[in-house]
Image (cartoon, rainbow, N blue to C red):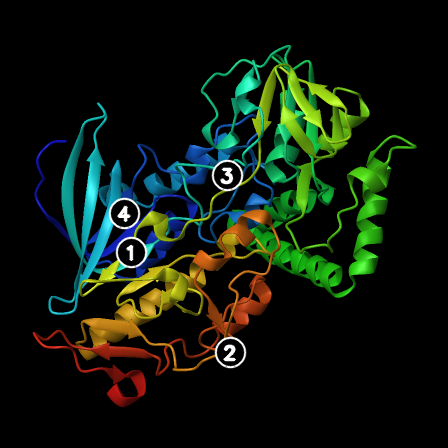
Amino acid sequence: MNQTTATEYADVVVIGAGLSGIGVAKHLMDAFPDKDFLLLEARASVGGTWDLFRYPGIRSDDSVHTYGYDFKPWLHKEAIAGGDLIRGYIRDTVDEFGMGKALRLGHKVTAADWSSEDAEWTLRITVTDEAGNESEKVVRAKFVFSGTGYYNYDEGFEPRFEGREDFRGDILHPQHWPADYDYSGKRVVIIGSGATAVTMLPAMVTGEGAAAHVTMLQRTPSYVASVPQVDKIAQFLLTVFGKKLGYRLTRVKNIWRDHFLVTVLVKYPSFGRKLLRSMTAKELPKGFDVDTHFAPPYNPWEQRLCACPDGDFFKAISDGSADVVTDQIERFTEKGILLQSGKTLEADIIVTATGLVMQMLGGIQPTVDGAPVSVADSVLYRGSLISGVPNWAMMLGFTKATWTLRIRNVARLAIEVIREMDRKGYDIALPVAPEGMPTQDLFDLSAGYMQRAKDELPRQGTDLPWQMHTTFVKDNRLFKGKLLHDDIRFSKRTAATPRLMSVEAAS
């Protein structure tokens, strides 16, 4: 470790240069062209999730016309797009809007300490240069926005499998896929039934270097639906109305289409089950055991629906290059996996697509005037500001709509907070949850990775302004009208404990 470098100062720091962080930074920079910004990214490249995950077939499972930014049209014909296209889109955004001057790659924030006396955050950073050398750095900031995602980049979730050490082949986790890994001609078993497994299965049996056979081994089925890879309506709108208006109309169309589908499936779960089963049966060979392998024990949208472009997942099963096994694992063996049914799945490669480890704020554990912040004990103001944590906002997206649709609104909230401080000469904005306020879970999915982290996540209230919804249409309504309420306490920097003033009192 080299010596500490010089301290850097900024009015606003955005942590994370993935899709969310870059989108938020663009809105903030537009709103405050005269402020000093820093965009800190721990990795050597921008892209976040799309730079980290490199497993076969990595792609979006939402239309990128909606998943992308409202200010930068998605012009590729593929609505369901591969990771390389999405990475290129993110890099182009940084270049097009001149964000490179604020970007600091290889800057991992390891600690964040707030001082009310100084009214600023001190961020401690490990800097890794292109040669892999590390040094320490300090950044002081008046306001911080964390766009760090919701899971641990360093480790995925892997259950303990009995006999793991006996298996003679390779065991890989999609989050740490080796570069240029050769699986051609190999027998592959993918453990898992979520979006990652549904994505990898068809990719690994397609084209040059394909695996000999791929089996998706699931304990519990998921809902899987075929979606068009090319959105013909979007292509029509872009052609007729041009890039800007055509893209806007496509986003509106997608938002309301998805909201309608989710609403119907959630409100009428029996109908939803029958509809999804019927759609699945049409994609598979006659006589296929749909009820064993594609009839989950939960209702639609209690977990996310898996999408496959142009039915590629079902085609791989139909042509025999892949299959699905629904069973439980007894143990790993030298040659594969012994199931509780007594059947053995022979494999050369086992892929543990067993999920994520959720993590808030990129693993940063802030302190406020020397006291550690317990994120799990906090409540989120409009799903973005953390109770008891001054001058800090965070990005959380939706579980039943495209995650990034929330970027503009959370950026608007941060902008309003900063503008209020600038207008009134305040230095501190502190969200304070009302004493005794009822709270509820932040997310509403039963997915394993969310349930495992339930006790570590912040909570939300039952009413505004401490509430968020899990669909864009409903949540967007919460951002209409006044964004700042009495529960954000504004104050000036003093050597003593700052006197807290509400928005109303300051007016």
How far is mark 1 from mark 2, CA to CA? 31 Å
Quarter of the image for residue 266 reads: bottom right
In the rendered structure, the answer to whether residue 497 lies left or right of residue 288 reads: left
Q: Amino acid at mark 3?
A: Phe
Find the distance from the CA under tag 1 to the CA under tag 3: 36 Å
Q: Which residue is mark 1?
A: 29
**x, y percent for residue 337:** 66, 23
**Local crowd at mark 4 within 10 Å, few (<14), some, or many (≥20)?**
many
User: What's under tag 1, amino acid-wise?
Assistant: Met
Image disc number at residue 463: 2
Label 3 sits on a secondary structure element that is loop
Classify mark 1: helix, strand or loop. Answer: helix
Of callouts 1 and 4, the N-terminal one: 1
How would you rate the neighbour count of disc 2 (Cα within 10 Å): few for under 14, some for 14-19, many for 20 or more? Answer: few
Q: Is residue 286 left or right of residue 456?
A: right
Which disc, if any, is residue 39?
4
Q: Earlier in the sequence, mark 1 or mark 3?
A: 1
* Residue under pointer 3: 157
- Who comes first in sequence, dot 1 or dot 2? 1
Q: Is residue 331 left or right of residue 97?
A: right
Above or below, 177 relative to 418:
above
Asked if residue 326 can be seen in this view, the reply is: yes
User: Percent x, y for residue 303?
Assistant: 65, 52
Q: Amino acid at mark 4?
A: Leu
Residue at (18% x, 65% y) in the render: 369
In the rendered view, tell whether residue 67 sits above or below residue 393: above
Does any portion of residue 88 appear in the rendered image?
no
Q: CA distance from mark 2 to mark 4?
A: 33 Å
